[in-house]
Every structure is written in structure tokens, then in C-alpha cells.
């Protein structure tokens, strides 16, 4: 979009927050870059130039605006919607792969040479993988500087910098303030003290956001010991590259309140990325809803609760296991099966609030499962004990860099994986916005209620007008049923009355 100058200028002049993250405005006279919705007086059109990423602005010598904090914009919705190599690379960079494995590791995961990846990212984003990762490290450092009291040396290495000098230079270059000055400014503006031993931050999103189906789904399907709904927040344990963590996510006007407790602060970038992915916070709900509303049968559902997101996952392998456990059983039964697996094979953790007890078991921990110990039908035991070794040895990959169509084919080749299981994994684990579940019981009920075609083939053909947002159409169709996944849990004090 950044090449459409006229459209970008209109967005900046109208301070349209819908375009935050789509492009960045660099002001030639001040050498500052902003998000489109920056509250300051818009510069003259001749003084504006546009870039596709914050990293590209930084490489061109611009520094981040202190008012609108463009580095904290929601991510571009393109990277979740698209399935090409650039989108897959961006999802991997956001998950910290460059920091952990370098550019060669990124390229190997994508099946390209490092030079090809560099060239593709430069052509589309104006910055290579190292510059994009550096920009992300700067934002992680800012979060740690502003929300913790850690010594700056610890902040530097937790954010992924290789030296204190590089950390200091980068922070000064990107934010035009020293690390100490950033902390002082944040302390002056802080209204409430930070959580001891934790990190509290706001996760931005594009409005509107309907929290009902998003948090309702996560709460209704929560696995005891791993997830819970407590005091208007969804809480869960996280398995991360350097350790583990506990996160509490709560919907607030204009943002998601995120409280993180990590055993290793080097995992902060990955934890934030996975929480954003879980809640689908980089989506463009206006574009989605506008297309779905064009269908006269879906329009009333969209108008009744716009801004629905697709609840996703923090761990694709975990979700694949849970999808198998949930085959042809109720939500309550699926939670029971998963809770037994967690109690038997999950790693225990300490939760200061007392509700969470385990990490969900990794594929490696489940690889030696005794099929006879599983309280499942024989066919489902076979499905699970075939899936887990494939995930453990890497022959089946469901990570951020995975080609979605290849993953679909690999899943479909496993015993017991029918269209419903493949598509629900594509929707929630692979993040495909166009995944569709024509055989799902809730979708079939909704189809009957709305007058949509009854057979899976006919319904799939009818749903072609919803592409590429069929996964969002699923969220709206599910609202026809009065199921707990569609509603925020009732506060506990109301449960007792």
C-alpha cells in the first residue's frame, strides 16, 4: 500500500487508525516517522514519504515519533493472510527465529538461500531480515526499559542484543533517547506500579474487536491446569524457547491488557508474538466484515457483533493434539481428555495465583505414549500415536514458516485425519484465514437456520463469495447456536446468585 501515495496521504490527513501497521509515514523535514493515526498536525503532503515497515524507516535514517510510538502499531494483516515466502518469513522473524538461528536458519526453514530471502524482503519491505529483527529487538528493549526495573545490561541481553554498546546505539538511533531517558519518561507517565516480577503491557489492535467469541472460545475450551478464566482474564502457561511463562490476557477498550511472568526474559519477543497470534490481533476487521456483510444471509450476523476474530493458538503442535482429542466428542469431553494427558505428561510449574499447574506436554514428551493407557476409542488412539511421533521428529511441521497447503496434505495422509480435523488445524494452528469447516455440526445447524445449502459440497461452493475470509465466516456462523464459546464467561459472583 505504501506505493499508493494519494491513498496514504488521505489516511494520514484523516488520522485513520485502520491503516496503522499497513504503512509508515516518514516526514522529510523532521526526520521522524509516524503511524497514520499520529495525533500531531499532519505534515504537508510534499514533506511525506511512505515506507512498508518501521525497519525501512530506521534504515533510511528516520527516528520513531515520541507521540504515536509507531513501533508499537499492530502488525500488518498481510503476514497472517498471505501464504507466500515473504509472509512466512515475517511470521518467523516475529517469532524470533533470526535472533535464535540467524538468517541461515530462517532461510533453511523456508527452503530458500539466505540471498534469496534477503532479496525478497528488501523488495517488499525495504529492509532485510537482520534490519527487521533489529527493529523488533529495539521494541522489545523499549518494553523492558519501560515496564521493569531491570539493570540496562540485563535488558540489553534479554532483548537479544549482543553487546551493551549495540543496545545503547540502537535505542538512541531508533527513539532519539538514551535507555535511561526512556525509563525516566515512562516513570513520569506511569499511573500504576508494575507487577512485581512481571511485565505489564498493552497489546494494540485494529477496531472493532468483539471479545465475546474470542475469549469465550478460549475460556470454554480451556484445559484445566494449563488454562483458566480468572477475574475477567484468560490465563495460561506458555512453553517458550528458553523457558516457560504464564500470561494473563484481558480485553480493555482499545487494547488487550497483557501481564507476563517469564522464567527467562529472552523469551519476551516470542511471548508477545504468540499472544498476538492467539488473539488474532493483527487482523483487519473492517476489511473482513465489509466483505462478509455483502452476503445478505451473513449481514445480520456481522451487524449484530462486528469485529469477531479467529481464536488461534500459542503452540501449533499442542493444538493438533487437542484437535485429535476433540474429534466427535463434546467440548467438555475434549477438555477432560486433554486434562488427563496434561496431568500424566505435562511439566509442573508454579503459579503464584494458584490456578495453573502444568505446561502442555510437548510432542517429545508424548512420543512414548502407551496406547492402552489412553481412554479413547482404538481408532483415535492410532491417530494420536501416529501424529505425535511425526511432530516430535519434525517430519510434520506446523510452525510459523510452514507452507499451509503442504501441511494440509501431510495431515490428510495421517490415519484418522478427515476434512474437519485438517481444516480446524489449518484455521487455528496454521492461521489460515480462509480455512472452512462445512462438515462441522455448528456450521450445519447455522446453514439450516439461515437457509444456506445443506450438503458440504454445496455449502463450500456457496462460501466461495466469502473468500479469503471463510475462517471469519465460521466465527459468525457459530453465533447462531447459543454455545458458551460465543460469550464471555459470567463473573463468579454472578454464578453464585
Image (cartoon, rainbow, N blue to C red):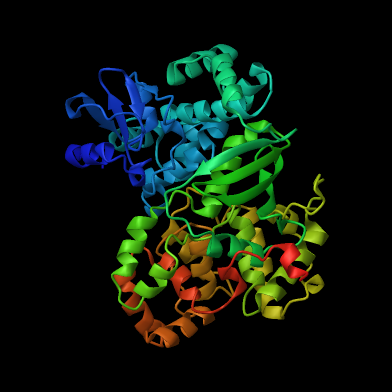
Q: Position of residue 79 (x, y in %)?
A: 40, 47
Nearest the viewer among 175 and 3 is: 175
Q: Residue at (52%, 61%) from the top-left corner?
A: 428
Q: Is residue 57 visible?
A: yes
Nearest the viewer among 172 and 369 is: 172
- The number of numbered discs placed on residues in the rendered structure image is 0
The residue at the far top in this view is 165
Q: Position of residue 412 (x, y in %)?
A: 50, 70
Q: Is residue 153 left or right of residue 407?
A: right
Q: Position of residue 163 (x, y in %)?
A: 58, 15
Q: Residue at (82%, 45%) from the top-left corner?
A: 350
Q: Is residue 399 visible?
A: no
Give the vertical position of 211 relative to 166 (above or below). Answer: below
Q: Quadrant of the N terminus?
A: top left
Nearest the viewer among 465 and 252 is: 252
Q: Quadrant of the C terminus?
A: bottom right
Quarter location, residue 14: top left
Give the vertical position of 135 relative to 116 (above or below). Answer: above
Q: Is residue 28 left or right of residue 367?
A: left
Q: Position of residue 341 (x, y in %)?
A: 77, 64
Give the vertical position of 420 relative to 347 (above or below). Answer: below
The residue at the far front in this view is 497
Nearest the viewer among 297 and 405 is: 297
Q: Residue at (41%, 33%) from the top-left corner?
A: 114
Amino acid at each position: 500500500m505504501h506505493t499508493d501515495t494519494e491513498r496514504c496521504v488521505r489516511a494520514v490527513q484523516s488520522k485513520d487508525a485502520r491503516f496503522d501497521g499497513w504503512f509508515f509515514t516518514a516526514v522529510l523535514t523532521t526526520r521522524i516517522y509516524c503511524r497514520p493515526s499520529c495525533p500531531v498536525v499532519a505534515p504537508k503532503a510534499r514533506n511525506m514519504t511512505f515506507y512498508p515497515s518501521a525497519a525501512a524507516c530506521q534504515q533510511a535514517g528516520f527516528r520513531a515519533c515520541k507521540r504515536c510510538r509507531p513501533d508499537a502499531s499492530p502488525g500488518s494483516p498481510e503476514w497472517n493472510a498471505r501464504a507466500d515466502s515473504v509472509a512466512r518469513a515475517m511470521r518467523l522473524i516475529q517469532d524470533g527465529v533470526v535472533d535464535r538461528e540467524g538468517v541461515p536458519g530462517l532461510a533453511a526453514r523456508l527452503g530458500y538461500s539466505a540471498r534469496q530471502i534477503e532479496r525478497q524482503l528488501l523488495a517488499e519491505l525495504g529492509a532485510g531480515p537482520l534490519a527487521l529483527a533489529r527493529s523488533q529487538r529495539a521494541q522489545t528493549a523499549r518494553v523492558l526499559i519501560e515496564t521493569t526495573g531491570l539493570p540496562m545490561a540485563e535488558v540489553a541481553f534479554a532483548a537479544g542484543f549482543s553487546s551493551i554498546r549495540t543496545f545503547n546505539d540502537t535505542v538512541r538511533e531508533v527513539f532519539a533517547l538514551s535507555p535511561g531517558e526512556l525509563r525516566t519518561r515512562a516513570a513520569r507517565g506511569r499511573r500504576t506500579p508494575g507487577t512485581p516480577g512481571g511485565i505489564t503491557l498493552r497489546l494494540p489492535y485494529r477496531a472493532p474487536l468483539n471479545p465475546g467469541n474470542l475469549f469465550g472460545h478460549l475460556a470454554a475450551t480451556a484445559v484445566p491446569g494449563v488454562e483458566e478464566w480468572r477475574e475477567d482474564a484468560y490465563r495460561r502457561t506458555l512453553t517458550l524457547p528458553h523457558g516457560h511463562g504464564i500470561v494473563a490476557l484481558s480485553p480493555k477498550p482499545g487494547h488487550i491488557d497483557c501481564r507476563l511472568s517469564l522464567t527467562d526474559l529472552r523469551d519476551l519477543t516470542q511471548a508477545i508474538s504468540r499472544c498476538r497470534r492467539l488473539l488474532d490481533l493483527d487482523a483487519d476487521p473492517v476489511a473482513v466484515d465489509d466483505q462478509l456483510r455483502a452476503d445478505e444471509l451473513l449481514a445480520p450476523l456481522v451487524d449484530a457483533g462486528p469485529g469477531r476474530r479467529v481464536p488461534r493458538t500459542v503452540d501449533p503442535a499442542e493444538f493438533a493434539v487437542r484437535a485429535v482429542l476433540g474429534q466427535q466428542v463434546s467440548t467438555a469431553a475434549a477438555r477432560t481428555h486433554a486434562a488427563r494427558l496434561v496431568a500424566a505428561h505435562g511439566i509442573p510449574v508454579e503459579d503464584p495465583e494458584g490456578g495453573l499447574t502444568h505446561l502442555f506436554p510437548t510432542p517429545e514428551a508424548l512420543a512414548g505414549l502407551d496406547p492402552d493407557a489412553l481412554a479413547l476409542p482404538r481408532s483415535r488412539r492410532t491417530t494420536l500415536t501416529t501424529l505425535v511421533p511425526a511432530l516430535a521428529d519434525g517430519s510434520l511441521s506446523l510452525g510459523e514458516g510452514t507452507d499451509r497447503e503442504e501441511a494440509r496434505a501431510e495431515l490428510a495422509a495421517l490415519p484418522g485425519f478427515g476434512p474437519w480435523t485438517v481444516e480446524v488445524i489449518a484455521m487455528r494452528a496454521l492461521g489460515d484465514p480462509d480455512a472452512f469447516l462445512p462438515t462441522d455440526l455448528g456450521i450445519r445447524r447455522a446453514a439450516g437456520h439461515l437457509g444456506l445449502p445443506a450438503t458440504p459440497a454445496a455449502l463450500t461452493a456457496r462460501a466461495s463469495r466469502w473468500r479469503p475470509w471463510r475462517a471469519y465466516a465460521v466465527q459468525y456462523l457459530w453465533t447462531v447456536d447459543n454455545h458458551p464459546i460465543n460469550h464471555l464467561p459470567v463473573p463468579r459472583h454472578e454464578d453464585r446468585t
